[in-house]
Image (spheres, grey):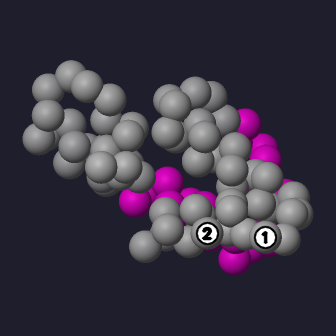
Amino acid sequence: MHLQAVFEKAHAPVEDDSARIFRQLLDALEHDTPFDLQLLYRLSYPDFDTALNALREWRSQRYVWLLEHEGGQPWRSHLG
C-alpha cells in the first residue's frame, strides 16, 4: 500500500523534488544500493511519513521473502 504510493509519486507526470527523491529511494531498495537518508528531510511531512511507512512495508516483505527463499535477491521480492 505505502510502497504503491511511493511508486506512483515517483512516476507522477509532474517533475518535482519529491518525485526525484522517491525514484532514488525505490532504486536503492530495488538494487540494494546506498540511499542518503538526508534526502527524506526535503519531503513534505505527509510524503516523509509515506516514505517511512514504505520502508517498513519493504522491510516486512523482505523478511517474509527471506523466510520463503534461500539465497536469491530478496530486495526484488515485490516485483514478482
From this view, report whether residue 3 is shown above or below residue 73.
below
Which residue lies under the disc numbered 2? 8
Residue 22's tag is none
Left or right of 30 in this view: 7: right
State the CA–CA distance, disc 2 to disc 1: 10 Å
Q: Is residue 59 magenta?
A: no
26 left or right, relative to 3: right
Q: Is residue 38 above or below residue 17?
A: above
Please name the amino acid that badge 1 sits on: Pro
Residue occupying the point 30% across, 49% down: 80
Q: Which residue is mark 1?
A: 13
The kind of residue on which mark 2 rests is: Glu
- Residue 41 seen from this side: no
Quadrant containing the N terminus is bottom left
Most foreground residue, 63 or 80: 80
Residue 49 lies, in percent from the top left, at: 62, 70
Q: Which residues are magenta?
A: 36-57
Are there few (<14), some (14-19), or many (20+) residues within 10 Å of tag 1?
few
Could you tell me which residue is drawn at 87 percent across and 58 percent down? 17
Q: Looking at the image, can residue 55 be seen?
A: yes
Between 14 and 29, the one nearer to me in the picture: 14
- Total labels: the figure holds 2
